[in-house]
Amino acid sequence: MNKSRWQSRRRHGRRSHQQNPWFRLRDSEDRSDSRAAQPAHDSGHGDDESPSTSSGTAGTSSVPELPGFYFDPEKKRYFRLLPGHNNCNPLTKESIRQKEMESKRLRLLQEEDRRKKIARMGFNASSMLRKSQLGFLNVTNYCHLAHELRLSCMERKKVQIRSMDPSALASDRFNLILADTNSDRLFTVNDVKVGGSKYGIINLQSLKTPTLKVFMHENLYFTNRKVNSVCWASLNHLDSHILLCLMGLAETPGCATLLPASLFVNSHPAGIDRPGMLCSFRIPGAWSCAWSLNIQANNCFSTGLSRRVLLTNVVTGHRQSFGTNSDVLAQQFALMAPLLFNGCRSGEIFAIDLRCGNQGKGWKATRLFHDSAVTSVRILQDEQYLMASDMAGKIKLWDLRTTKCVRQYEGHVNEYAYLPLHVHEEEGILVAVGQDCYTRIWSLHDARLLRTIPSPYPASKADIPSVAFSSRLGGSRGAPGLLMAVGQDLYCYSYS
């Protein structure tokens, strides 16, 4: 009798053990630990993919996912996830995602330093030269493939920056850099430690390999307002000024300022520059700006406002206003045709025919549409194609004759940031920095992703790199490659 009661009690205990959810979780942890102890196989993804946003890694794909729990592959156990951020339990999905992104960034940086990448499979200098000799490659394709080969071999080197105020270089952070037409100079906007921004010009003529040294020329101009948009302006001569759009602050309205490059001592390549016009135009809430090199809109610049485009003549002060249905976030003038292309927050891209004026309905020459806010528009040299990117991470090449998208460039990451595009037709490449702080380079002709460059700094919203690419950094005898400004540092990815 006692024996049967003891067996019944044993069976009842085993059933209650299985029905208890805490015991089921512990059993699943034990089983998962035993499976995770086995060697995991590589997932086979390439280095050029964007960072993963899942809670697990490739090595833990066999571990079952439990709602509300995270499996740590290092400690080989589950941890509970709590909603929100708090000091008691800092383990959240956001912190897990940042940890995975940082580990991938460090791994890619090690691979960048350890080995050279190849843009295409079976692609090397000897095979390319042989195909050219046999007539399989024309001169244009040969030059494009040669640039691809050099891009795959670019090596990162830190640029030494000298200044009259060395202490400022250690504290001021780069906000953006912008190269001029000939890549002789680099205009910089730096966020200062006490708040606000200051400007500088870096002369790139001294950027020589193997010792990369440059000098930053600064001035006393300082602003406590946010710089929304910047472009080089050609008033006295090519790139004689810098056009800045500043956001309004409190009761101070926004403005567009023409800053002469001559204010920066010895900033001009020739060392001689006439005094330039320093002027400021009160413009409320300018999101974007563009300078016109078209003869039919000489000495004019455009600013994209909230639901309005404002065209201003610097010499006469005459203004033209064009009403829009959305905020204008990106602008560029065409060189041959009298057209101004605009990208809006609504996703619309339209061209303004400068010959029609602002009366009537004929001033909208072309209309294209994205599904998200357009952050950058770039017109190709023949002015038959336009490149545009948006806040959904889409980069599209549009045929302006048929108003159709003919090519799309995959891999760009953006959710809400104002990120520019850099199109270089001579080299046949497209460069863009994503919100994940990765710099990606595509082939302009077949949209192939050629290289993904991780940031030297940990990825964060405050440290998105600003880049400038040219095959002649510093002029005709300069060092070709990519300049990247992030944090307090300037890096050069030069051709080897």
Image (spheres, rainbow, N blue to C red):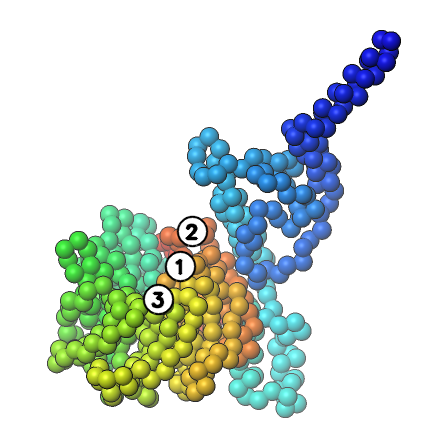
Q: Residues within 10 Å of mark 1 (few under 14, many from 20)?
A: some
Q: Label 2 amino acid?
A: Ser
Q: Nearer the viewer, residue 480 or 49?
A: 49
Where in the figure is residue 110, as x and y percent of width and height? 56, 54
Tag 3 and tag 1, C-beta contact below 8 Å: no
Quadrant into which the N terminus falls: top right
Res 386 label: none
Comparing marks 3 and 2, which lies closer to the viewer? Answer: 3
Q: Residues within 10 Å of mark 2 (few under 14, many from 20)?
A: few
Q: Residues within 10 Å of mark 3 (few under 14, many from 20)?
A: many
**Residue 26 relative to residue 47: left or right:** right
Q: Is residue 31 placed above or below 428 in the rendered structure?
A: above
Give the CA separation, mark 1 to mark 2: 14 Å
Identify the residue under disc 1: 416
Res 345 label: 3
Identify the residue under disc 2: 460
Where in the figure is residue 241, as x and y percent of width and height? 22, 73
Where in the figure is residue 375, as x and y percent of width and height? 37, 67
Q: Is residue 180 visible?
A: no
In terms of image quadrants, where is residue 79? top right
Of pointers 3 and 1, the one earlier in the residue sequence: 3
Q: Is residue 244 visible?
A: yes
